[in-house]
């Protein structure tokens, strides 16, 4: 599954390609559905292979490279055109999930851009062919979880497993070096860099501020469309009495650093640190990572910088994984456009960043952001240096950093959590439809209507319910009856207003208002 570390494409002599057709992603494994439930329900109302298309793509490689290697974007364009032509001119409803949301953002820019970089469809292609885009669990602005994965090949679940069984994943038990192999492989996948947080400190907060500050995990109530903007923080006075978490500090070395006032944190710049070389023995050759090229001085410099925000994690990843970031920076961008008329934004590296692109000129189109809430979702991490070893990842989540004595705390096992679907924070999934694209903005000049549809997580009551029919979890939401009903209604002609407009349980509108973004 690994790709070439220089090109991000096939390694010599190895060729892995995605399965095509509806079976490409109906089930991930026997009994574990992904699209199967939605496919079955669409079939019940008359959909079949000729008017229902699974846009399978190689999710390992960069979005533009799926066209270069497999012509996937061209195939999607042709398939949509054929469905519209054979369907009596009825426009298509697109339903992307997770990374597919970013992939389709890229597609909408590619399809209208002139050849050879784009598909040559012209500026009105989306308006002519797309009725609605119903994004499920979309990481529009990235996910902090991607940073942890690229930095130390772990996240909350891996760190928790390591805490339960110390040494099992870290040591060379059975000579497997599990996390090292995962890191070596995942760092060859350019697509993972599409998930790095976008918008920097403006969106995600800095050392002292974040949009979700004061968040306390408590029971929510539904906010109807007419009252969403007037909603007050449900934490009320309770929230002001609790110690606020600094969610903007995506990586902190030590719980004391995570909780300290910024003026009390002494930091040294790591970017000019002299890298050395750790000469690991021959057993490490199969899992050699760029950490072995940093040396102890480089590793120590990273830790002594103490804390990293969404603005500085890019420098951090550039320092610890320069080859990976060199490839990634050619295909993705993470900033905020000052002037969208600048010719540089015609380049494909900006197309999957909603803060550096315009939506198509399609005033009749609708965009939905559909995602689960009610599950603690990774937002920031407390790290520590791991114990030395010959084949090792020098940084790990500090699972001893905990605040279990405080039931309202968002810190558990070294991970700060906020509102979301367990993978994508609500801020990332909802901000663009709540504010960035709401009404006519510089990112949405034609005023495409946007809607937020949140689904409050309710775990299965018993084993007979399987993964739950009211789940808000990132993948399990694909079997959520309410979400499926919304998709079926739009697929049969309904509009966002017919669905009731926004359906909100979180504080997404309040958090969005706190973000000072020029629109």
Image (cartoon, rainbow, N blue to C red):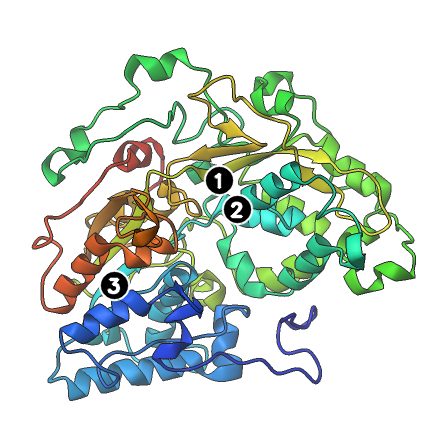
Cα distance between the residues tagged 3 and 2: 25 Å
Label 2 belongs to which residue?
145
Q: Quadrant of the N terminus?
A: bottom right
Pick the residue in front: 17 or 351.
Answer: 17
Q: Nearer the viewer, residue 462 or 179?
A: 462
Of the two numbered discs 3 and 2 in the rendering, the one whose residue sits closer to the viewer: 2
Residue 397, above or below 71: above
Q: Nearer the viewer, residue 337 or 43?
A: 43
Q: Give the spatial CA distance, label 3 vs label 1.
A: 26 Å
Q: Secondary structure at mark 2?
A: helix
Q: Is residue 208 above or below residue 121?
A: above
Q: Residue 330 placed where, x, y %?
A: 58, 64
How many residues crowd mark 2 within 10 Å: few (<14), some (14–19), many (20+)?
many
Task: Please give the residue where the numbered disc 1 appears in the rendered image.
Answer: 378
Quarter occupied by residue 514? top left
Position in image of residue 45 (x %, y %): 13, 73
Decide: marks 1, 2 in contact (CB < 8 A)?
A: yes
> With 415 as the anchor, is 376 left or right in this view?
left
**Which of the two labelled residues, at mark 1 and mark 2, occupies the earlier sequence position?**
2
Residue 85 vs 245, above or below: the answer is: below
Mark carried by residue 334: none
List the residue tagged with mark 3: 133
Query: Which quarter of the picture shows residue 86?
Result: bottom left
């Amino acid at each position: 599954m690994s790709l070439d570390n220089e090109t991000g494409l096939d390694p010599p002599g190895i060729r892995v390609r995605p399965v095509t057709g509806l079976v490409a992603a109906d089930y991930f494994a026997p009994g574990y559905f992904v699209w199967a439930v939605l496919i079955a329900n669409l079939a019940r109302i008359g959909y079949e292979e000729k008017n229902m298309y699974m846009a399978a793509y190689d999710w390992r490689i960069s979005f533009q490279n799926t066209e270069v290697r497999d012509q996937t974007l061209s195939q999607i364009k042709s398939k949509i055109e054929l469905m519209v032509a054979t369907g009596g001119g009825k426009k298509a409803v697109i339903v992307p999930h997770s990374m597919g949301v970013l992939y389709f953002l890229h597609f909408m820019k590619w399809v209208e851009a002139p050849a050879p970089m784009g598909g040559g469809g012209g500026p009105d292609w989306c308006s002519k062919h797309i009725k609605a885009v119903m994004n499920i669990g979309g990481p529009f602005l990235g996910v902090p979880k991607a940073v942890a994965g690229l930095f130390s090949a772990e996240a909350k679940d891996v760190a928790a497993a390591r805490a339960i069984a110390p040494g099992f994943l870290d040591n060379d038990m059975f000579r497997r070096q599990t996390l090292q192999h995962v890191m070596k492989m995942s760092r060859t996948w350019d697509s993972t860099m599409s998930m790095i947080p976008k918008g920097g400190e403006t969106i995600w907060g800095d050392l002292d501020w974040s949009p979700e500050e004061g968040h306390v995990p408590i029971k929510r109530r539904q906010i109807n469309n007419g009252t969403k903007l007037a909603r007050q923080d449900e934490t009320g006075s309770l929230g002001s009495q609790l110690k606020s978490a600094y969610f903007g500090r995506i990586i902190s070395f030590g719980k004391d650093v995570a909780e300290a006032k910024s003026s009390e944190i002494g930091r040294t710049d790591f970017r000019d640190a002299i890298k050395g070389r750790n000469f690991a023995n021959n057993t490490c050759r199969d899992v050699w990572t760029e950490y072995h090229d940093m040396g102890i001085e480089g590793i120590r410099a990273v830790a002594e910088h103490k804390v990293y925000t969404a603005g500085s994690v890019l420098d951090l990843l550039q320092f610890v994984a320069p080859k990976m970031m060199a490839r990634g920076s050619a295909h993705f961008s993470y900033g905020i456009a000052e002037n969208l008329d600048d010719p540089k934004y015609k380049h494909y590296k900006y197309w999957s960043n909603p803060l550096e692109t315009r939506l198509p000129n399609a005033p009749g189109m609708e965009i939905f952001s559909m995602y689960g809430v009610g599950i603690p979702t990774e937002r920031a991490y407390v790290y520590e240096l791991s114990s030395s070893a010959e084949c090792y990842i020098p940084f790990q989540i500090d699972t001893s950093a905990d605040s279990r004595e405080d039931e309202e705390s968002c810190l558990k096992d070294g991970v700060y959590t906020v509102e979301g679907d367990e993978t994508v924070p609500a801020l990332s999934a909802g901000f663009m439809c709540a504010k960035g694209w709401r009404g006519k903005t510089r990112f949405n000049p034609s005023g495409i209507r946007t809607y937020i549809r949140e689904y409050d997580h309710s775990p299965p009551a018993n084993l007979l319910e399987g993964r739950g029919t009211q789940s808000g979890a990132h993948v399990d939401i694909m079997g959520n009856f309410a979400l499926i009903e919304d998709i079926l209604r739009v697929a049969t002609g309904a509009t966002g207003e017919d669905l009731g407009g926004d359906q909100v349980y979180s504080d997404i509108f309040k958090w969005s208002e706190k973000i000072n973004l020029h629109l």
